[in-house]
Image (tube, rainbow, N blue to C red):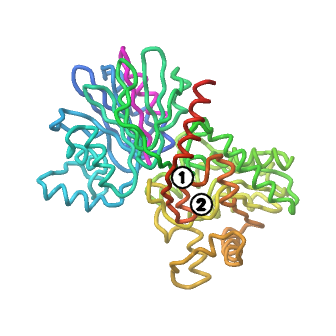
Amino acid sequence: MSGIFGVVSKGDCAETLYYGTDYHSHLGTEYGGMAVLGEDFVRQIHNISQSQFKSKFYEDYKRMKGNKGIGAISSSDEQPIYLNSKFGPFCIVTNGLIENTEELAERLLKKGASFSEVSRGAVNTTELIAKLVTQGNDLIDGIERMFEAIDGSCSLLLLNKDGVYAARDRFGYTPLAVGKRDNTWAVTSETSTFPNIGLETVKYLEPGETILINEEGIAQRRPGGNINQICAFLWIYAGFPASGYEGINVETVRERCGQCLARRDRDIEIDVVSGVPDSGIAHALGYAMESGKPYRRPLVKYTTGYGRSYTPPSQEVRNLIAKMKLIPKKEIIEANKIVVCEDSIVRGTQLRNFTVKKLWGCGAKEIHIRVACPPLMFPCRFNLSTRSIHELAARRAIRNLEGPDIEDVSEYIDHNSQKYKKMVEWIRKDLEATTLRYQTVDDMVGAIGLPREGLCLYCWTGESPRINGDTLCNVLRNKQLQLKNG
């Protein structure tokens, strides 16, 4: 998982690049990097696993001089990558997941290419993407050939003398949006970067679209396609609450998710509604609004120095963050029947060990877990999100109910089936909760507000639909027009 940001200005861009990139810190924990082009390229990459992006780059950005630049915060690869190619020198940052990395790297090695960057013993994915792009007749052709070659997803920003090229993944799994202020143009993974640096969102890139931003503005270099299946998990968990994708705000979707959960919860009596900080909070607010029960904070997050427990690659680090960041308040917990809204259950170990146990330990009377999305059944194929199938709590439950792993889990996906109910009950007991209920696929899709065919639901259903998309693209274009017209 990565967040990427690019900017072009008629003046110096380094400060805007610094703050714009920093606003992606919720999307990565391992590496941060920036590259600026003025008289020449200036590039800097730091490991940010034990420190914040701002502190690592505070002195660096003051030394960077130029009117165009790109940055990234990543959970895997060191980037930006610099490459001197037949198209001239450029820097590149990427966001996505390539499943056939080894096959593509081997193919390039046989052609005489070499790789200088290594990430955890493997080829650096961003360097691989850069070298795939150089196989084209020009940069735009190279980006298209890269899209054709990869199995997975990739959105990218490419910085050269022309400006910043931005290309959104051809099926739209990862978003990119353009913002403007006076003589400055920027492109970002998260629109929440824009308000505090004075930019206004003016465009969402369509899937497969490539644009160039430079001192004169924005120019389309390749139109988008007719297929969009943006990651639904962006609204449920990964995205920042102030961000919007396809014109739909994250916070409002989470509130609607909570309302849906409450509407299915007429059979329990509760005293307090709460959310696991931070991403569960808006889901809980929606639940409280719908149920009429008070929202309170039995668990508070100590924010300084502790990021998300979901994004670090190491389970040991994830557990440490989960343990240390949430502080229970006994005065609110004791003797209360509490609804705990959570964005998702991936492994379940953190929820059980570092949330539920803290609540029981402070004297909770009942703990009702409500999850804003359906059970996660498949590891994400398109970004560094859900990981191994063996880690997933739902799959662990199925193994305990069925024995060895089974290939057909369709009955466990159907929330009306007896097998689904048995799976959820197994997870409830494992979590040591009073009750456990998940969001349905239909309610989640309805809360987001896009057609089901326009969302990637692979993590929950195993489906990766490919549609004609004319109707969907019209829906998205209308949303963009509404945004532009206020």
Residue nearer the viewer, 446 or 78 = 446
Q: CA distance from mark 2 to mark 1?
A: 9 Å
The residue carrying mark 1 is 309
Q: Amino acid at mark 1?
A: Ser
Which numbered circle lies on residue 17?
Answer: none
Q: What residue sits 21% from the left and 44% below the top?
A: 136
Q: Secondary structure at mark 2?
A: helix
The residue carrying mark 2 is 350
Number of numbered discs on residues: 2
Residue count near mark 1 (Cα–Cα under 10 Å), binned few <14, some 14–19, many ≥20: many
| Vertical position of residue 82 compared to residue 238: above or below | above
| Vertical position of residue 76 compared to residue 90: above or below | below
Q: Position of residue 274 (x, y in %)?
A: 75, 50
Q: What residue sits 86% from the left and 62% below the top?
A: 268
Instruction: Please report the bounds of the magenta region as a residue range.
Output: 1-23
Relative to 378, 125 lies left or right: left
Relative to 314, 416 lies left or right: right
Q: Earlier in the sequence, mark 2 or mark 1?
A: 1
Q: Position of residue 236 (x, y in %)?
A: 61, 50
Q: Secondary structure at mark 1?
A: loop
